[in-house]
């Protein structure tokens, strides 16, 4: 139901913003909106500022996204502001739906089979990101190797860290313990710091434009923070790497692949793997873009092979 | 760290797919080159697009649109279209391997004190891109020409 509303709202947004001026930078150079709200690829920010605003313009974006991984479904939406092609501010709400199959298995494991059914649950998280372009012009500096570089901070806050998991009869044997807490997470919030270097090589591969991006992220997050931050045994920041390689195969089509490393703080059920995806993004004009991706997250609790489809719509205004 | 990364990434089907795409792209290039006659293979981008004749058409189309643009048209008041067209053709011809030598004034000098905004530069780029498409250049040729023209940005805006 919630999902249908979001999709309907996004369609309204798309049609509304089609009529608005969305900035003068070249098509596709605003990237898409990642699942955490920052502009770039689907799972990693780029150094490009969201939207199509030039140094003289302020532009906004709105997005809605859907990632389906069998027993886990992530729905997310948000908006961003690109200011003078220098500063990007974004706010994103993520909702992770976890099926009763997963929660039942977790209870069964914890109680050695004494409890083997539980209700489905959801984890809501808010994300606020600020990104600042510090140097370079990733599109027009074609005579130099210097990429465009941006630095960012990303604050994430759980809304369900203390939400009791319920059994079918409405009781909660582990009061005030959400999924992240049960799996051993220490904190309900955390701030990531990242540096992204992005460069577009025009006419590079057989005349096609090649986009390369590398992001270094300093983080305490467990599974992007959806499973909390830090653990009892490991509460330190770790450096993670993220990257994108993409080809612009036509003025309106981008295909590419991405990766993102994770640290395995919680271990056990919540062991984390390197995330990869392959995507195709469609930019019919500067008003909106649509992206479809195949994502491989590796292990999620009680689901060792988590692969699925990811859809994003971003509207620019 | 790097080795770990390589191993992890190399394992995934996504990476395999990506490698395939790139091989395909590179494969296309070599196939194309090898099937062309030797004289053609050595051709520059300039020759490939049809030389100055094509550039003349491209910039003719672009300049008409630029002069009529409500935001950037005024910068060209008093500049005859034919003069600008000649300059742009010879400059681009030289940049993409044609037998021309640009003898016009330096970009930095001609744009000094105009205080051209980045937004205005992008508008012009889109007219040139649009003209290349309308004249029938391929997307790849358009990208390669844009790659040569791109550094002009830093020689024209906010001077």
Image (tube, coloured by chain):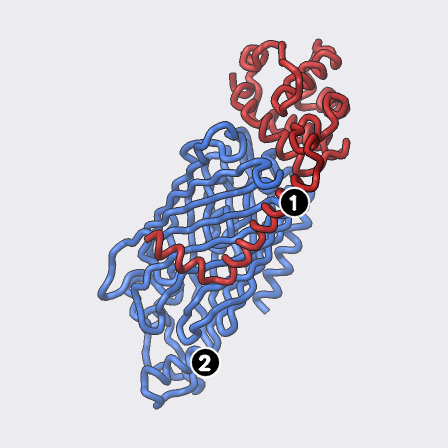
Chain colours: A blue, B red
Q: Secondary structure at mark 2?
A: loop
Does the image show residue A17? no
Label ID, residue B31: 1
Q: Is B144 drawn above or below residue A220 in the view shown?
A: above
Location of mark 2 (residue): A119
Please, which chain is the residue tagged with disc 2 on? A
Residue A25, image x, y percentages = 59, 34
Q: Quadrant of the C terminus of chain A?
A: top right
Visible residue check, residue A304: yes
State how far apart marks 1 and 2 are (Cα): 58 Å
Letter of the chain that mark 1 sits on in the rendering: B
Give SS at disc 1. Answer: helix
**Same chain for the residues at labels 1 and 2, yes or no?**
no
Q: Are marks 1 and 2 in contact (CB under 8 Å)?
A: no
Identify the residue at the far left of this view.
Answer: A233
Foreground: A314 or B82? B82
Residue B156, located in which quarter of the rendered image? top right
Tell us which disc is closer to us: 1 or 2.
1
Q: Residue at x 42, y 54 (%)?
A: A127
Q: Nearer the viewer, residue A199 or A172?
A: A199
User: In the figure, is residue B103 to the left or right of A219?
Assistant: right
Label 2 Cα neighbours within 10 Å, binned few <14 / some 14-19 / many ≥20: some
A67, above or below B26, in the image? below
Q: Position of residue A71 (x, y in %)?
A: 49, 74
Q: Please identify the quadrant where the N terminus of chain A is shown.
A: bottom right
Identify the residue shown where x is 31% and y is 56%: A220
**What residue is shown at x 25% (from left), y 59% (from top)?**
A235
> Which label is found at residue A4?
none
Residue occupying the point 30% across, 62% down? A187
Q: Is residue A212 left or right of residue A174?
A: right
Q: Position of residue A165 (x, y in %)?
A: 39, 77
């Amino acid at each position: 139901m919630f999902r249908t509303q979001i999709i309907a709202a996004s369609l309204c947004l798309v049609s509304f913003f089609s009529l608005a001026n969305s900035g003068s930078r070249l098509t596709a150079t605003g990237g898409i909106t990642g699942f955490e709200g920052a502009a770039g690829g689907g799972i990693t920010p780029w150094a490009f500022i969201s939207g199509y605003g030039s140094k003289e313009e302020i532009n906004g974006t709105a997005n809605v996204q859907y990632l389906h991984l069998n027993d886990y479904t992530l729905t997310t939406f948000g908006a961003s502001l690109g200011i003078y092609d220098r500063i990007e501010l974004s706010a994103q709400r993520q909702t992770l739906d976890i099926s009763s199959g997963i929660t039942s298995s977790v209870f069964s494991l914890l109680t050695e089979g004494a409890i083997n059914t539980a209700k489905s649950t959801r984890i809501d998280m808010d994300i606020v990101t600020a990104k600042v372009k510090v140097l370079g012009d990733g599109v027009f500096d074609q005579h130099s190797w210097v990429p465009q570089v941006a630095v960012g901070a990303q604050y994430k806050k759980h809304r369900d860290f203390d939400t009791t998991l319920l059994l079918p009869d409405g009781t909660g044997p582990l009061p005030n313990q959400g999924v992240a807490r049960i799996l051993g997470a220490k904190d309900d919030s955390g701030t990531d710091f990242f540096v992204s270097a992005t460069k577009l090589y025009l006419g590079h591969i057989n005349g096609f434009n090649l986009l390369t991006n590398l992001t270094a992220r300093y983080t305490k997050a467990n599974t992007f923070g959806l499973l909390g931050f830090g653990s009892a045994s490991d509460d330190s920041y770790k450096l993670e790497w993220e990257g994108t390689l993409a080809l612009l195969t036509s003025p309106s089509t981008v295909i590419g692949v991405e990766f993102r490393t994770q640290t395995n703080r919680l271990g056990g059920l919540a062991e984390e793997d390197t995330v990869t995806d392959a995507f195709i993004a469609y930019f019919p004009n500067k008003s909106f873009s649509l992206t479809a991706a195949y994502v491989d997250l590796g292990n999620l609790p009680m689901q060792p092979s988590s692969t699925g489809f990811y859809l994003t719509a971003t509207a620019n205004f | 760290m790097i080795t770990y990364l390589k191993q992890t990434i190399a394992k995934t089907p996504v990476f395999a797919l990506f490698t395939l795409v790139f091989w395909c792209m590179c494969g296309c290039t070599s196939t194309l080159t090898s099937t062309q006659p030797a004289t053609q293979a050595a051709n520059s981008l300039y020759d490939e697009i049809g030389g100055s004749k094509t550039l003349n058409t491209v910039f003719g189309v672009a300049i008409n649109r630029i002069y009529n643009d409500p935001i950037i048209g005024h910068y060209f008041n008093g500049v005859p279209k034919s003069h600008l067209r000649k300059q742009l053709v010879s400059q681009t011809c030289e940049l993409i391997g044609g037998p021309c030598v640009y003898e016009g004034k330096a970009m930095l000098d001609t744009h000094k004190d105009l205080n051209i905004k980045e937004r205005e530069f992008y508008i012009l780029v889109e007219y040139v891109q649009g003209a290349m498409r309308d004249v029938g250049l391929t997307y790849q040729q358009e990208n390669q020409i844009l790659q040569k023209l791109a550094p002009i940005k830093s020689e024209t805006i906010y001077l």
